[in-house]
Image (cartoon, rainbow, N blue to C red):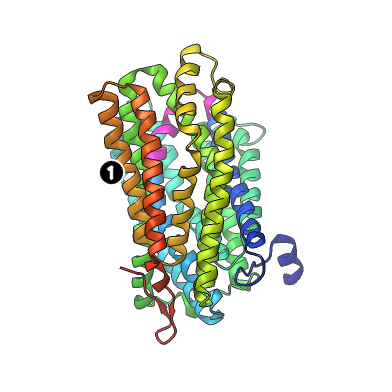
Amino acid sequence: MGEKLQKRLGKQIDSTEGSLIKSLFQLSWPIILSNLMQMTYNIVDTIWVGRVGAKSVAAISLSFPIVFVLLSLGIGFTIAGTTLVAQYTGANEKEKVNHVVGQIFSFVLSIALFCSIIGIIFTPNFLKWMGASKQVLPLAVNYMRILFFGMSFMFVFFIFSALLRGNGNSITPMKLMFVSTLINLVLDPFLIFGISFFPELGVSGAAVATVFSRAIVALLSIYFLWKGTYGLNLKWKHLKFDFKLIKEIINLGAPAAIEQSTRGLGMTAMMSIVAHFGTMTVAAFGICTRVLSLVIMPSRGFSTATTTMVGQNLGANKINRAEKSAYLSTGLNFILLSTLGVAFFTVPQLIIKIFNNNPEVVKIGSSFMQINGLFFGFMGVLIVINGGFRGAGNTLSAMFFSIFSLWIIRIPLANILSKVFGWGATGIWWSFVVSNVAGSLTAILWFKRGHWKKNIINKEEKTVKPYK
C-alpha cells in the first residue's frame, strides 16, 4: 500500500547522476506549480472576502504583513532543512537524514508554537501599530487570531515540503498543496456567507477555511513522515533536541529568515516612496508588482531546485557537478526571463490593461514594463544563484546579496532618482534595473570565487559547517 501511494504521489530525484537538465526540470516544475497554487489561494480569499465589503478586505490587507514576518521565521529555518537533507542525501547518510528531519521538526514547530502564542496575545497591538481603524480593528483581530491559532499546521506543511525537496521529491508537496488549495476554494464561500448549515463567519470564515485546509495536509505530512513513505522516517528518538545540530540549523536558517523578512519590509518601503507620486502611480505599481510576481515564479522554482542539486552533489563530493548545476540553472532561467521581458517590452499596454484600463494607469505601468522588460533576466539570475549558495549552506551570502540589492541599492536609489534628480516614477523604475543588474553581477562574481565549495559535510563530525 505504501509503495503504491508513493508511486502515485511522487518520487525522489537523484541529481548526482544522469542529466542535469532533466533533474532541474523534474525538480522545478512542481515547485512552480505549487507557488502558482499559493497565489491562487490568496487571490480566492481576496475575491470572496471582497464580496463581504471593503472593511473585510482591509482587515486581510492589514494582517498580511504581520503574518508574513512571523511566517518568515519558519520559512527561513525550513530552508536549513532543505540544505541539510540535500547534503546528507547526496552523501547517502540515511540515518543522519532522519536525525535532521526530527531536529528540524522539533525546532521549527517550537518556533511555530511560540509565534502562535505571541500572535494571539499581541494581535490588537500589532494592528494598532499598523494603523487599523476602529471599524476594521475587530474584524482584523478575529481574522489574525484564527490564523495564529492554526500557525503550527502551516509550519508543519512548510517543514514537510522543505525536507522532501531536499531529498529530491518536489512532486508530493505540489500535490498536497493542490489538495489544500481545493479544500480552501470549496470551504471559503460556505464559511464566509453561511451557505447551507454552515455559520456565516464573514472574514473570519476565510481564516477558518485556511486553517482547516492546512490542517488536513499537515496531518497527512506527519503520517507520511512517520510511516517513512518517501525515504524520510520520523521517529520519537529523532525528536529529542540535539543542541549541537540545532546550533547548525540556526546558523543556516537565521540568515534565510532575515532575508525573507527584509524582503517583505523592503516592498513596504518601496510602496511608501511610490505613494508620493499619487494614486495612479500606486495603482500602476501595484499591478506591475503582481505581474513581476508571476514573471519570477519560474525563478523561484529553479532556485529551490538549485538548492537541492547543489546540496546533493556537494554531499556526494561532486563539486564540479554542483557548480555546473548552478550555472546551468542560472543560464536557462536568464534566457527564459529575458524572452519574457522582450514580450513585455513589446506590448506593455496589453499587459497592464488586463488589470486596469484607466489611460493614466496604463501609461505609467507601461513605462515600468518598458524600462524593466529587457532586464528581466538579471532579476532571475540573483534569485537562482542565491539558491546555489543555500544548497552549499552559505545562507549568509544569499542574505547579503538580497539585502544589498534591495536595501543598499534599490530603495536609496529610488529616493534619489525620483526626488533629488526629479525623475518622478521613472526614477523608481530605473532603481529596479540598477539593483537587479548590480545584485546579480556581484553575486555571480562572488559565486565564481568558489568559497561556497567549502560547505561540504565533514565526514568525521557528521555535521555541516556553514562558511563564514
- Residue at point 36% right, 45% down? 438
- Which secondary structure is most common in the magenta stretch? helix
Figure quadrant of residue 60? top left
Q: Is residue 98 visible?
A: no
Pointer 1 local density, CA inside 10 Å: few below 14, some 14–19, many at least 20: some
Question: Which residue carries the number 1 mark?
Answer: 408
Query: Which of the image's four quarters has the C terminus?
Result: bottom left
Closer to us: 403 or 197? 403
Q: Is residue 60 above or below residue 108?
A: above
Q: Position of residue 20 (x, y in %)?
A: 62, 63
- Residue 372 screen position, x and y as percent: 46, 32
- Residue 283 is left or right of residue 186, and the answer is left
Rendered location of residue 64, percent (x, y):
42, 39
Q: Residue furthest top?
A: 359
Q: Amino acid at mark 1?
A: Ile
User: Which residue is located at x 43 percent, y 82 percent?
Assistant: 462
- Residue shown at 37% from the left, 31% from the top: 430
Q: Assign the N terminus to one quadrant of the image.
A: bottom right
What is the number of callouts on the image? 1
- Image height of 147 relative to 223, above or below: above
Which image quarter: residue 145?
top left
Element type at mark 1: helix
x, y percent for residue 435: 36, 41
Indicate whether residue 462 is drawn in magenta. no
The magenta span reads: 49-66
Q: Is 62 colored magenta in this rendering?
A: yes
In this view, the residue farthest toward the left is 420
Would you place residue 89 above or below residue 360 in this image? below
Answer whether residue 355 is visible to the viewer in this image.
yes
Q: Identify the residue shown where x is 41% and y is 78%.
A: 463
- The relative height of residue 7 versus residue 136 in the rendered view (above or below) is below
